[in-house]
Image (cartoon, helix red, strand yellow):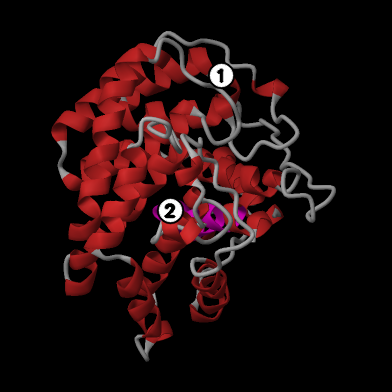
Amino acid sequence: MRTPICNLMLLIAVLLTSCQQEIKKEAEKSTSGIPQVPTLDVKLAERILALPKGCIVQEYPNKLGQTLGSSGDLKTPKELRPIFYGCFDWHSSVHGYWSIIKILKDFPELDSNGQVRNTLSEHITDEHVATELAFFKDENNSNFERTYGWAWLFTLQKELTDWTEDHQAQQWADMLQPLASELVRKYEEYLPKLTFPIRTGTHDNTAFGLSLSLDYARSTGDKEFESLIVTHAKRLYESDKGCPIHYEPSGHDFLSPCLEEAYLMSKIMPEAEFSVWLEDFLPQLMDENLQLEPAKVTDRSDGHLVHLDGLNFSRSTCLSGIASKLGGRDHLKRLAAEHLTYS
């Protein structure tokens, strides 16, 4: 389950958010050669739903990623993490829950018998959340899933809290809130100590984590958390210039360090200020003749090399978001669509 789930969630993030709608809208009204992007209809949603629906309850294979403090820590994944034990690892399981919620919100008919909701209710309980929370409070695992998994837990919680008309979703959100609050506390403790941003193209990329976390803070009205993220994003990135995007990607990236940073800054700067910053940081994006080839995967059975499909999806999200901040740039929307349709 490892190979498809990470890339699947990045694809769903593109298909089910405004990014896809913006690309599609631009393609319909423009003759600029923007490729048509796939539309998430009920048939495609049903196919996508099948994967996370199956994997959130699949305990093995499993990559625990924990630090053992004693022999007493040797437990099964389900004992350690009674909610997020499936889908190979913790963050992929959180991805899975998020994608299920996202699809059910838009396509409730795909769970007409309530089986999926029953599965979620069996897993998301106060008792299970307490066990998940205890793992993060263990001194040997206090940095577990920092900050990639944290950001996806925020994204799941945002999805649930936004679903205000659904009583069951609000119950799940209420039960998960202690875990979300603990991760906010950990972020508040961690960010002031982060001297330099982590600029990798994989899980621990600082900009990606901050970007999703900022969306959560704003959606839930957590002004203190929002201020913390904005303050430290500016501290870490505001003076950056000349990002070497020509060195990207590395062999198993699923994130673009340059584009993730630019996308984050597009969320915290006014348009005019962001445009000036971007001219210094990544002037190539202003060039209407910019060529940015999608990443090519040579072996999709390799769980690391296939990350490059995820890179194409995450690049698409960043390019579309940056274009929207700049008032719409056909060449960036074209590149976003090309990356989305390539993989």
Tell whether position 10 is magenta.
yes
Q: Position of residue 123 (x, y in %)?
A: 35, 68
Identified at 68% across, 55% down, the residue is 3
Q: Is residue 80 above or below residue 210?
A: below
165 left or right, relative to 281 = left
| Residue type, label 1 | Pro
Report whether residue 253 is seen.
yes
| Residue type, label 2 | Leu
Identified at 38% across, 76% down, the residue is 119
Between 75 and 268, the residue placed more toward the observer is: 75
Tell me the tag on residue 80. 2
Q: Quick one: label 1, few (<14), some, or many (20+) residues within 10 Å?
A: some
Q: Is residue 145 above or below residue 179?
A: above
Q: Main secondary structure of the magenta part?
A: helix
| Quadrant assignment, res 27 | bottom right
Compare marks 2 and 1 and give the one earlier in the sequence. 2
Q: Is residue 177 above or below residue 269?
A: below
Give the extent of the magenta segment: 7-22
Q: Which residue is mark 1?
A: 283
Element carrying mark 1: helix
| Quadrant assignment, res 180 | top left
- Quadrant of the rendering where the C terminus is positioned: bottom right
Q: Position of residue 79 (x, y in %)?
A: 43, 58
Q: Is residue 4 above or below residue 208?
A: below
Element carrying mark 2: helix
Q: Are marks 2 and 1 in contact (CB under 8 Å)?
A: no
Identified at 51% across, 45% down, the residue is 317
Looking at the rendered image, the disc whose residue lies closer to the viewer, 2 or 1, is: 2
Between 70 and 343, the residue placed more toward the observer is: 70
